[in-house]
Image: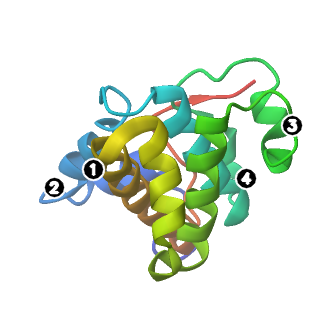
């Protein structure tokens, strides 16, 4: 654990930040009930960010149920038959976002919009920003994630 987090998990750390902690956790959870994008797709994108950032703790979380085989095949989403074209479009955009959100092209955005419309694209981009930030903070703090169920 880092000197910032000590032995605290993220929920405990957020509890020590009363001005932002609870609000940030509610914001994080607010993306799953959005009607613009299926919650499973949002979760797949969060999990892919966790993989790309090498956050085993975030990947271990199950914020929303994912169909059998998808979690295990996530690293191979390009070729694994368990992913739909809509999920692939979102996962591709998520990968670029993780590396450099400024590198997201019109073609990547259009691929997401083809399946989920402009509102779906906006929901995805907002979710990715929050998830990415939360994962990166966890890595900096070296705190165990909290707020979701552990995937077993």
Q: Residue at x 35, y 41 (%)?
A: 117
User: Residue 22, percent across and down?
Assistant: 21, 46
Q: Residue at x 45, y 27 (%)?
A: 38
Q: Which of the labelled discs sits on residue 109, or is there none?
A: none
Counting other residues with Cα less than 10 Å from the Cα at mark 2, is it few (<14), some (14-19), or many (20 or more)?
Answer: few
Task: For marks 3 and 4, give the CA distance.
Answer: 21 Å
Residue that carries the numbered disc 3 in the rendered image: 80
Residue that carries the numbered disc 4 in the rendered image: 56
Q: Secondary structure at mark 2?
A: loop
Q: Closer to the observer: label 4 or label 1?
A: 4
Task: For marks 4 and 1, give the CA distance.
Answer: 23 Å
Task: For marks 2 and 1, give the CA distance.
Answer: 6 Å
> Where 142 falls versus 29 (above or below)?
below
Residue that carries the numbered disc 2 in the rendered image: 18
Q: Which of the labelled discs sits on residue 15, or is there none?
A: 1
> Where 39 falls versus 49 (above or below)?
above
| Quadrant in which the C terminus is drawn | top right
Q: Residue at x 80, y 27 (%)?
A: 82
Q: Residue at x 47, y 75 (%)?
A: 101
Q: Secondary structure at mark 1?
A: helix
Tag 1 near tag 3, CB within 8 Å: no
Q: Secondary structure at mark 3?
A: loop
Tag 2 near tag 1, CB within 8 Å: yes
């Amino acid at each position: 654990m880092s000197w910032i987090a000590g032995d605290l998990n993220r929920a405990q750390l957020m509890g020590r930040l009363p001005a932002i902690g609870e609000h940030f956790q509610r914001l994080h959870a607010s993306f799953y009930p959005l009607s613009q994008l299926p919650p499973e797709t949002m979760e797949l994108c969060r999990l892919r960010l966790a993989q790309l950032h090498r956050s085993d703790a975030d990947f271990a979380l199950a914020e929303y149920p994912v169909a059998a085989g998808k979690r295990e095949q996530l690293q191979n989403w390009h070729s694994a038959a368990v992913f739909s074209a809509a999920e692939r479009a979102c996962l591709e955009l998520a990968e670029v976002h993780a590396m450099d959100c400024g590198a997201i092209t019109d073609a990547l955005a259009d691929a997401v919009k083809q399946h989920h419309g402009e509102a779906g694209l906006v929901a995805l981009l907002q979710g990715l920003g929050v998830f990415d930030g939360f994962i990166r903070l966890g890595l900096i703090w070296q705190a165990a994630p909290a707020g979701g169920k552990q995937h077993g």
